[in-house]
Amino acid sequence: MTIKQVLRMGDVRLLRRAEEVDVFDTPGLHALLADMRDTMQALDGVGLAAPQIGVNLRVVIFGAQASPRYPDAEAVPDTILINPVITPLTDDMAEDWEGCLSVPGMRGLVPRYKTLRYQGRDEYGVLMDHTVSGFHARVVQHECDHLDGILYPMRMRDLRRFGFSEALFPDGDIPSE
Ligand code: NI
């Protein structure tokens, strides 16, 4: 079990374009994914991108259980996504609260496409092709943004809706990271 340190906003390594993975099913790739899973679980995150632990590759993981505390956040299947390509299927966007393990303790209201298609590969190089919407689509967009050096505050339209979780949600009903 290896919990890696997650880089925080301000670290220039979060601002790079990550590189494509071109060899799959390698011990190095499996080890990276194990570290990412351990780190995401330990920090109770919904997703993690390799650049967040300092590895500049186009690899993300995400997944969330349905939680009665956050009725809007439906379950998202545990997914490994490598070299993703996102195609929005509508111009419709929705705003909702996001957090990020690289921006700890903060939340912001972020516009995202409501429905999208994503394609990519798993750790064995097998192609995947899914169409998702809502919270699932939001998570995919957030994680894939990390691969292009984009953190969610850079997507926000109104920085008045950016702040410390406890200040934004004094009742403690804080949406998940
Ligand atoms: Ni993030």
Image: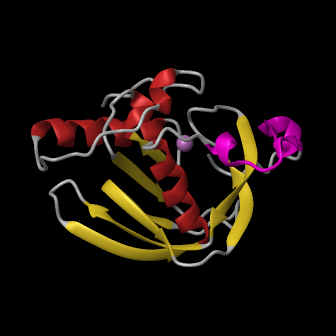
Whether the magenta-drawn stretch holds residue 68 is answered as no
Q: Residue at x 52, y 61 (%)?
A: 65
The N terminus sits in image quarter: top left
Q: Is residue 104 visible?
A: yes
Q: Quadrant of residue 129?
A: bottom left
Camera-nearest residue between 30 and 146 = 146
Camera-nearest residue between 142 and 76 = 142
Image position, residue 154 (x, y; %): 66, 41
Q: What number of labels is visible?
A: 0
Image position, residue 168 (x, y; %): 86, 42
- Write the start and end of the magenta stretch as one range: 152-170
Residue 70, relative to residue 162: is it above or below? below
Q: Residue at x 44, y 54 (%)?
A: 62
Q: Residue at x 59, y 69 (%)?
A: 74
In screen coordinates, is 154 left or right of 167?
left
Q: Ligand 1 quadrant?
A: top right
In screen coordinates, is 71 left or right of 62?
right
Q: Is residue 41 visible?
A: no
Image position, residue 39 (x, y; %): 42, 35
